[in-house]
Amino acid sequence: MKAGIEPEMAKHIQRWESPASLSQWESEINLMRNFANERPEVQRTHIRNKFNISNNLNITLKVSDAAHGIVKINTIEIDPGTVGVPDNPYPWTGVYFHNIPITLQAIPKDGYYFSHWSDDATGTNAKISDTPTTNKTYTANFLPIPINLTTPMYFWALDTLIANNTPFVT
C-alpha cells in the first residue's frame, strides 16, 4: 500500500502541508508497521491474562505430500487457496494456547485417501481433537486410491433378454 501512495505524497505535502515532510510520513508508516507487527502478541497476552492461560504453544502441521491433501485446524484450511496461506504452506506453524482444545481434519485431494496420523497423533480417523500442553507436530499421511482395472465400474446389458420392468440387482 505504501508503494502505491508514495508517488503522490510530495504533491499531497505541498498542497496540504500535512504531514510536514516525507520523513514524517515515513515515520508514521513505521509506527503503523510496528503496531501491526506487535498487535498479535498483545492480543494473545490479553487473552491469556483474561482466561488465566499459562502460555502459547506452537502447533506444526505437515502432510506426507502437499499434492495429496491438506489439513484443517479448527476453522482454517491450510491450503494455498485460503487467504493468508502461502503457496507452499507445509510445514505450517501456528500459535495456539496451552491446554485449549484444537480440532484437526485431514482432507484428501481427488484420487487420494487419508491413511493415518503420525508424529504427535496416531490413528486412522481423519478428524481428531487434542488438548495440547506442549508444542506439537501433526502429520497427515495420504495414499493414492488403488484402481482395479480388471473389474468394470459399470455394466449395461443392452439387449432384449431382460424385460424393461425387471428390478436392478447388484
Image (spheres, rainbow, N blue to C red):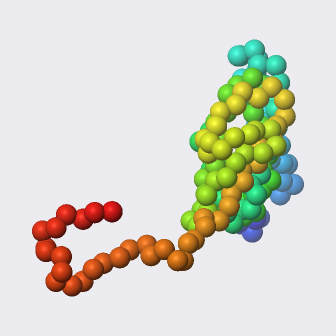
Q: Nearer the viewer, residue 85 or 47?
A: 85
Furthest residue in direction bottom, as rendered: 159
Choose top left, top right, bottom left or bottom right for residue 168: bottom left
Q: Nearer the viewer, residue 105 or 145?
A: 145
| Residue at 84%, 34% in the rendered image | 135
Q: Position of residue 151 (x, y in %)?
A: 48, 74
Choose top left, top right, bottom left or bottom right for residue 97: top right
Q: Position of residue 144 (x, y in %)?
A: 65, 65
Q: Is residue 128 left or right of residue 136?
A: left
| Residue at 80%, 38% in the rendered image | 120
Q: Quadrant of the N terminus?
A: bottom right
Q: Quadrant of the C terminus?
A: bottom left
The number of numbered discs placed on residues in the rendered structure image is 0
Q: Position of residue 118 (x, y in %)?
A: 78, 45
Q: Is residue 154 left or right of residue 148?
A: left
**Residue 38 can be seen, yes or no:** no
Q: Nearer the viewer, residue 70 or 41?
A: 70
Is 88 located above or below residue 23 in the figure? below
| Residue at 61%, 45% in the rendered image | 126
Q: Is residue 141 left or right of residue 137?
A: left
| Residue at 64%, 49% in the rendered image | 106
Is 34 located above or below residue 150 in the figure? above
**Residue 103 can be seen, yes or no:** yes
Q: Position of residue 64 (x, y in %)?
A: 76, 58
Furthest residue in direction front, as rendered: 161
